[in-house]
Amino acid sequence: MYSEHASLIRDNIYLHPRVAYQELPKLDQEVFINNFPDLVSFSPHSYYNLILIFDWDHLYPSKELYCRLLAYYNRKSYQRAQGEIIYKEGKIASAS
């Protein structure tokens, strides 16, 4: 069974281009989602949505991935973040 917050990340998992274009360990998203923990928000707020970005440290290359968890308490901030991700993906795609 999924944690309360696992359903929020299901459609919001991104691989940073540094991960997508490198020979790094592959991410099994289903296993990750199945093991995603419940999170505690700052009271009295609850999370509107979550975004996970998997990356690796380009300054200290390794074979391990880490993730950035971005948490949003309202629709406006979440939509702003989604817009930035789409914009940056477009810039990267046009540069290659």
Image: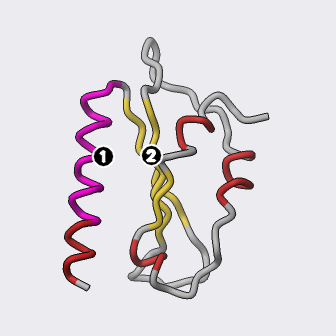
Q: Is residue 93 above or below residue 21?
A: above
Residue where numbered disc 2 is placed: 51
Q: Which mark is residue 65?
A: none
Q: Is residue 39 above or below residue 55?
A: above
Give the SS element for disc 1. helix
Q: Nearer the viewer, residue 50 or 89?
A: 89
Q: Nearer the viewer, residue 8 or 61?
A: 8
Q: Position of residue 77 (x, y in %)?
A: 26, 33
- The residue under the point 70% across, 53% down is 30
Residue type beneath disc 1: Gln
- Reading the chain from its start, which is encountered first: label 1 or label 2? 2
- The residue under the point 25% across, 74% down is 92
Label 1 crowding class (10 Å Cα cut-off): few <14, some 14-19, many 20+? some
- The residue under the point 44% across, 75% down is 57
Q: Position of residue 70 (x, y in %)?
A: 41, 44
**Quadrant of the rendered structure where residue 29 is?**
bottom right
Q: Position of residue 19 (x, y in %)?
A: 48, 76
**Quadrant of the rendered structure where residue 39 is?**
top right
Residue type beneath disc 2: Ile
Q: Specify whether 96 is left or right of 51.
A: left
Q: Nearer the viewer, residue 5 or 58?
A: 5
Q: Is residue 95 magenta?
A: no
How many numbered circles does the render carry?
2
Q: Nearer the viewer, residue 65 or 95?
A: 95
Image quadrant occupied by the C terminus: bottom left
Colour scheme of the rendered structure: secondary structure
Residue stretch in magenta: 74-89
Q: Are marks 1 and 2 in contact (CB under 8 Å)?
A: yes
Residue where numbered disc 1 is placed: 82
Q: CA distance from mark 1 to mark 2?
A: 9 Å
State whether the magenta stretch is mostly helix, strand or loop: helix
Give the SS element for disc 2. strand
